[in-house]
Amino acid sequence: MATADVKHSLAADSGYALPRLRGLNRRALCLADASLEGAVAALIVLATASAYHTLVLGDAPADFAWRLYLASALLAGLSYGAFAWVSCARLLDGRELRWANLPESFYAWTAAVALLLLAAFLAGHAGRLSRVSLTSAYLVGIPALLAVRGFLHPAMSARIRRGELRFDRLAVIGRRVDVVDFLLTGELWRHGYHLSGALYLEDIEELSPAERNRAVADFARLSLKRQAEHLVIVTDLSDLDGMERLVRQLRRFALNVVAAPASSNRTLKFLDVVAIGPNNALRFLRKPMSDGAVILKRAMDIAGAGFGLVLLSPVLAGAALAILLTMGRPIIYKQERRGFNGEPFLIWKFRSMNVTESGHAMVQAEANDPRITPVGKFLRSSSIDELPQLINVLMGQMSLVGPRPHALSHDAALEREVENYAHRQRIKPGITGWAQVNGYRGETKTVEQSAGRTRHDLYYIDNWSILFDIWILMLTVLSPATRRNAR
């Protein structure tokens, strides 16, 4: 069978018959997204400045510095658009959760305005720009750009999940059963992939070595004509000699050539290849934080917890007095929970129930739980009951931000129910976290709720930054979602 004319498509090989968006690729998608978001940013700068000068100051349109503000708007739009391109690329790589890219929008807008001010200063025009109009543009831009990002990215993600948006083309080489299993089990059509062609190794087995090499090279050329960016070799990973023969014929082509195991296992993930001496080794897990990041996060924890204890000391004293007068002792109870690297520790909380459970055997609090006292209900709904955990932060057992630790009995059950649940323990637990500010707080009655909380926690671990921590702390105070499911 001639392999250069292979014209298999994902629809033909897998039974999927979805609308094909021609001419669509990753660059075009990100360019469209970045252009739209950048245009909105530029419009905000220009519109705010013109409104302030004409409506507030009463300047005539002829007196308005159109060129200066137009240049400023274009610079802000281009800067924000560049950041939007990066965020779009992360979304298309499948590394974003719903709403997870909103912090990046805030950071990007802050950086774009800062670059605008720096450019104006260096060009000697800083004095001609109105501080009021720029401040107003920045403040107006925060909710406006968050709204635009909050609409575009979820809409794009929904279309990708439905298989309506396919922007990455790939070609596959392997045995027919392995190729079909790779395509079907992974449901690549739900992740933005479109199959440009497949070369089945059974079809070239009877050819001479020279003809096989020529068939592989012809298939690579055909894949490039069809705008494929990835060529996947689906094979037994122990067959290194066979892979090398294929790769040798593909070296001349500008393709991403990758190997996928001929297996239905989609749980074990390869991160990358690392050198261990002269050997190449597959890496499955990576330390979530570098040594420098650990030191930076710890410094923030010590400063934040110390400042919080001083600032909130009247609240702490008032809560302690209310508990003492209505429930008696103990005021603070300690419950054993699992923390960093799975090590147990005693978490501190203000007592809010008429019972104190150790954590080894307990019943999770739920709505209208009769064990919660009236004072305890207020403490829990306002999160004041969690404030003693600032002591845990100073002791190094917890962080200000991180996955919420669960009682030992819940922890063991969730580890059985939710895949990758234990990965949450690769970083210190926190008083608040990305899951909590997205509404995953309180009781978890279903596996879907537990899986959603775990998914957000793992996203936080994989994308940690000090700015991300600051954003979560801001949302903890300001976002209604944080208190939505408080019990």
Image (cartoon, rainbow, N blue to C red):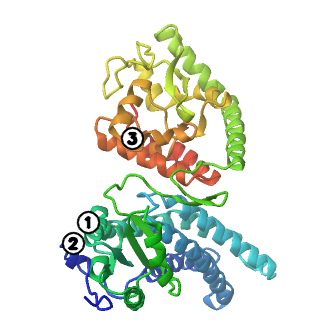
**Label located before the other in sequence (3 or 1):** 1
User: Does residue 54 appear in this view?
Assistant: no
Q: Secondary structure at mark 3?
A: loop
Quadrant location of residue 283? bottom right
Marks 2 and 1: CB-CB under 8 Å?
yes
Which residue is drawn at the image coordinates 31% and 57% (left, top)? Answer: 264
Q: Is residue 202 above or below residue 458?
A: below
Instruction: Sort mark 3 into few (<14), some (14-19) or many (20+) by Cα contacts within 10 Å.
Output: some
Q: Secondary structure at mark 1?
A: helix
Q: In front: 449, or 2?
A: 2
Residue 51 x, y percent position in the rendering = 57, 77
Residue type at mark 2 is Ser
User: Does residue 326 appear in this view?
Assistant: yes
Q: How many marks?
A: 3
Q: Is residue 93 above or below residue 459?
A: below
Residue type at mark 3 is Arg
Instruction: Sort mark 2 into few (<14), some (14-19) or many (20+) by Cα contacts within 10 Å.
Output: some
Residue that badge 1 annotates: 184
* 389 to the left or right of 173: right
Mark 3 against mark 1, which lies toward the viewer?
A: 1
* 298 to the left or right of 171: right
Residue 391 x, y percent position in the rendering = 64, 26
Kindly report the distance in space between the C-alpha atoms of the residues bearing marks 2 and 3: 43 Å
Quadrant location of residue 136? bottom right
Residue type at mark 1 is Leu
Q: Secondary structure at mark 2?
A: helix
Residue that badge 2 annotates: 14
Which residue is drawn at the image coordinates 49% and 64% (left, top)? Answer: 146
**Label located before the other in sequence (2 or 3):** 2
Q: In front: 117, or 9?
A: 9
